[in-house]
Image: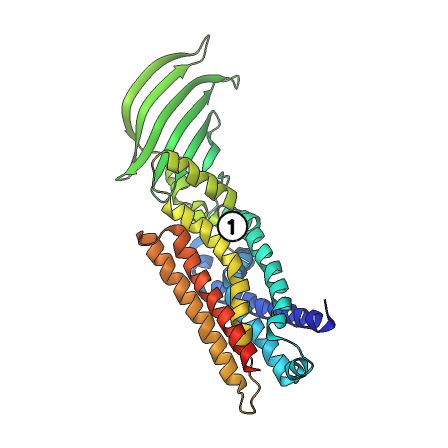
Amino acid sequence: MTKFNKYIIKLFVQYTVIVQVFVAIITLIANTFQHTKMLSEYNISFMTLIVYDLMKTPYLLYTTMPMTIVISTMLVMVTLLKNNELIAYVSLGGKIRNLAYPFIVSGIFLSVLLYFSADVINPKIMLERERFAYENIKNRTFNVSGKLTDMWLKESDSSFININLMDPTEKKIIGITEYHLNNNFQVDYIVTYDSAEYYEGKWIEKNKKVFAMDPVPVMTDSAEEVIQERELFDELTSLPVLSPKFLSLKEVRRTAEIMKKQDINTAKYYLQLYKSYAHALSVIVIILVIFPLCIGFNRNHSYIAVASKSLFTGFAYWMLMASFQSLGKTGLFSPLAANFIPIGAFFILALALIYRRERAL
């Protein structure tokens, strides 16, 4: 790698860090002011509120990374133009397409980081943030594992529940097994339900079976349908941390596969899964669009015009992605198409811009 490429990568990293720190400070201030009513509502300290908002910062930085990349790429190109370094590079025989190399290297690194954030960092942090809110703000017990399949929960000191699959957005639970213990902490009896659905404040549990375990397992009771209130199920399906965007990518994929076998609509889960992939790839595509867009060698080249074009392009990309996400939710496009058509369109635009700038020299 040449010194010039290393210099570009160094500039890119510096500007990205600066912009991300600025975004973090602004979002922290905005969120804190937005949540000030929680001080009196839950009688908590200002420091507790600060910690609560700080815990969401990594997730906010993850979501705002594409716009950060627009700004940092623009700043790198403006710096190269302002210092006449880009003119010197071209005068010495440098090619515009070769200039893409350091940007692609930086983009690949950020894409891997974003993928890791979506799969590992964000789910864990958001789960801990929800736990912090329950235990330190709402003063309630939090016993959720942050996944939707094979969940083990404690309902009481003598009762544990295993859930095969839960869909919080549809308020539906499949495969419920209750283990009830005796005074010796041994399984006294087991209750199973095929499924449970929320309806008008209560849960409709289907195909109930009760098995006594002592001295040998034997079914002692059964019912086709049981309607009752279940506070634990209410809490589980109402937790925002259990929405698809707060699950690891592995858990989202596993949930979608199980739901598909149950003939349940999996569009929202695959939409979220592909959105995470597209979000990681978007930084590379955005970089490849922005850097040739900022190139100009005439004397009337305006830095304000460069900034305007870059920000407008970033906004256009964001609008296109949001529009296709909405179309994907309505079913007009498949989850795969809804996420990758904008990526493909802007990648073609990037190649066209690079080719056009190359021909113009």
Left or right of 240, for residue 128: right
| View extreme (right): residue | 3
Residue drawn where x is 33% and y is 57% of the image: 327
Q: What residue type is labelled 1?
A: Met
Quadrant in the picture for residue 321: bottom left
- Asked whether 202 or 331 is in front, the reply is 331
| Depth check, front residue: 350 or 119 | 350
Front in this rendered view, residue 150 or 70: 70
Query: Which quarter of the figure has residue 179?
Result: top left
**Label 1 secondary element:** helix
Q: What quarter of the picture does the N terminus occupy?
A: bottom right
Mark 1 lies on residue:
126
- The residue drawn where x is 25% and y is 40% is 200
The type of colouring in the image is rainbow
Residue 152 to residue 59: above or below = above
The picture places residue 212, in percent across and down from the top left corner, at 41, 13
Whether residue 267 sits left or right of residue 78 in the image: it is left
The answer to whether residue 68 shows anywhere in this view is no
User: x, y (%) of residue 186?
Assistant: 51, 17
Residue 157 versus residue 172 in the image, above or below: above
Left or right? Give the position of 84 relative to 62: right
**Residue farthest to the top?**
215
Q: In which quarter of the image is the C terminus?
A: bottom right
Name the residue rendered at 49%, 27% in the picture: 157
